[in-house]
Image: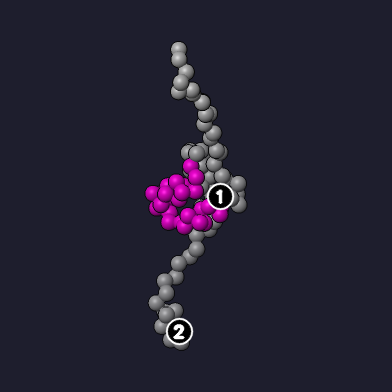
Amino acid sequence: MGLARSTYHDAIVAPQQDDEIVSRIRAIGEEFEAYGYRRICAELRHQGLVVNSKKVRRLMREHDLQPRRFCRKFFATDVWYRI
């Protein structure tokens, strides 16, 4: 055949297009605004799309899909305060 044995046994896997992954990340981000790259990666796996979390993080950073950060207000209470 003229092929190396390791080449013959390698599975031919077509790389997934980043556009498809970004569109799914956008859809998940619109539905769940507070999801970060870890939850989005888990949701993609739940949908049947296996993507590395590093790739999800990189695509979110490149396409400005970072979630909004929610700041909780801190109310300082005095323990010794008497009513």
Q: Residue at x 52, y 29 (%)?
A: 74
- Mark 1, Cα crowd under 10 Å, few <14 / some 14-19 / many 20+, is many
Q: Secondary structure at mark 2?
A: loop
Would you name the residue on which mark 1 appears?
A: 60
Dot in front, 1 or 2:
1
Residue 45 in magenta stretch: yes
Q: Relative to 27, does residue 4 appear above or below in the rendering? A: below
Q: Relative to 39, does residue 51 appear above or below in the rendering? A: below
The magenta span reads 35-60
**How much space separates mark 1 and mark 2, taking CA atoms?**
39 Å
Q: Position of residue 21 (x, y in %)?
A: 51, 52
Q: Secondary structure at mark 1?
A: helix
Total count of labels: 2
Question: Mostly what secondary structure, the magenta segment?
Answer: helix
Q: Position of residue 33 (x, y in %)?
A: 51, 38
Disc marking residue 3: 2
Tag 2 or tag 1, which sits nearer the N-term? 2
7 and 51: which is toward the camera:
51
In the image as oriented, which residue stretches furthest toward the front? 80
- Mark 2, Cα crowd under 10 Å, few <14 / some 14-19 / many 20+, is few
Q: Relative to 43, does residue 32 appear above or below in the rendering? A: above
Disc marking residue 50: none
Q: Position of residue 37 (x, y in %)?
A: 49, 48
Residue 48 in magenta stretch: yes
Q: Amino acid at mark 1?
A: Met
